[in-house]
Amino acid sequence: MRRYGKHTDEDDIRQRPNRKGNRPRTNIRPKHEEAVEGMVVTVDRGRLTCLVDDRLVTAMKARELGRKAAVVGDRVAIVGDLSGEKDTLARIVRIEPRSSVLRRTADDDDPYERVVVANADQLAIVTALADPEPRPRLIDRCLVAAYDAGLEPLLVLTKSDLSPPDELLELYGALGVPYVVTSREELESGAAVDRVRKQLDGKITAFVGHSGVGKTTLVNALVSQERRRSTGHVNAVTGRGRHTTTSARAIPLPGNEGWVIDTPGVRSFGLHHVDPSRVIHAFPDLEPGTEGCPRACSHDEPDCALDQWVADGHADPARLYSLRRLLATRERTEGD
């Protein structure tokens, strides 16, 4: 074995050859000061389409990001060919901090979180009043996910020509959720578009809903002709819609007055990731009443201080009922 003395020279140090021929690993990551900011508008099998200024650029995630994935709505830093021309490819080297993250799980027992969209301001929950029948439990779950993510909820009721909205609106009246009611004729004529757009101006709004409720039809009515997607029909036997949107897509509203994010139709909305203690933040009239609650109170037990808070006239009993209904969504199936 060769021994080195106290006064070795660089030439005395042996280096093992790199048989793979690649560069040695290092913890130093490039800073990419020249990177340009863009917004992810679609994700398709590992390739991301990003809006850079007024150009659509196709990009791949850089290796240094590791397992961190970019989703629709993300603000990212991009390097490489940013011309947007055919057969060009850029690299996403950084994902900027997110202002909000809407997540869901496949079911309540599934610990794997799926990020639906990032940086949205509002969640539009689209529900048909008939064909298919409304699913209040799914609406409840979407509301809980919105409150947990810090998004403003918006209830959009479609197909009012087939069934009146009164019963469903009464169920959610105590929550104070803004709503818009539309019919097929109003969408075709454009009469409902202005009412919906008023709720979207200046915001990034993610649209979620069960397949067949008319979500994509509504989005198509809101955006320009060249950005529209195909729509499907409800199966007459099962009462379920066919998925026509297979991936999330961010689309600018005309006049650059906001964005809509059309997401694939969902048949379940798991809440495994939701901390029930955060849902109370969406009820500012009830939150002060929790100061007298026992530690780790579920807000639906005999010692809950909210009962006395409401009895003393500080809040509407219907609000407490709505809170407890939402908190119980993880204990019920969406079809109940």
Image (cartoon, rainbow, N blue to C red):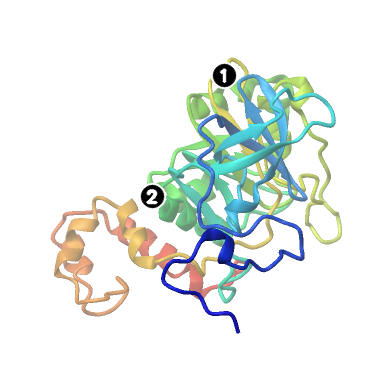
Q: Residues within 10 Å of mark 2 (few under 14, many from 20)?
A: some
Q: Quadrant of the N terminus?
A: bottom right
Q: Which residue is mark 1?
A: 256
Q: Is residue 218 above or below residue 328?
A: above
**In front: mark 1 or mark 2?**
1
Q: Residues within 10 Å of mark 1 (few under 14, many from 20)?
A: few
Can you give x and y, in whole percent of width and height, for residue 184 in the image?
A: 72, 32
Q: Residue at x 49, y 46 (%)?
A: 169
Q: Which mark is residue 175?
A: 2
Can you give x and y, in whole percent of width and height, for residue 281 in the image?
A: 31, 54
Counting the numbered discs, the total is: 2
Secondary element at image label 2: helix
For badge 2, the amino acid type reads: Leu
Q: Quadrant of the C terminus?
A: bottom right
Instruction: Examine the image and state in which quarter residue 238 appears.
Output: bottom right
**On the picture, is 1 further left or further right than 291?**
right
Residue 328 or residue 133, whichever sits in front: 328
Q: Earlier in the sequence, mark 1 or mark 2?
A: 2
Q: Is residue 304 visible?
A: yes
Can you give x and y, in whole percent of width and height, for residue 100 in the image?
A: 45, 46
Q: Residue at x 41, y 71 (%)?
A: 6
Q: Is residue 150 above or below residue 321?
A: above
Q: Which residue is most to the bottom?
A: 1
**On the picture, is 311 further left or further right than 168?**
left
Q: Which mark is residue 92?
A: none
Residue 221 or residue 27, whichever sits in front: 27
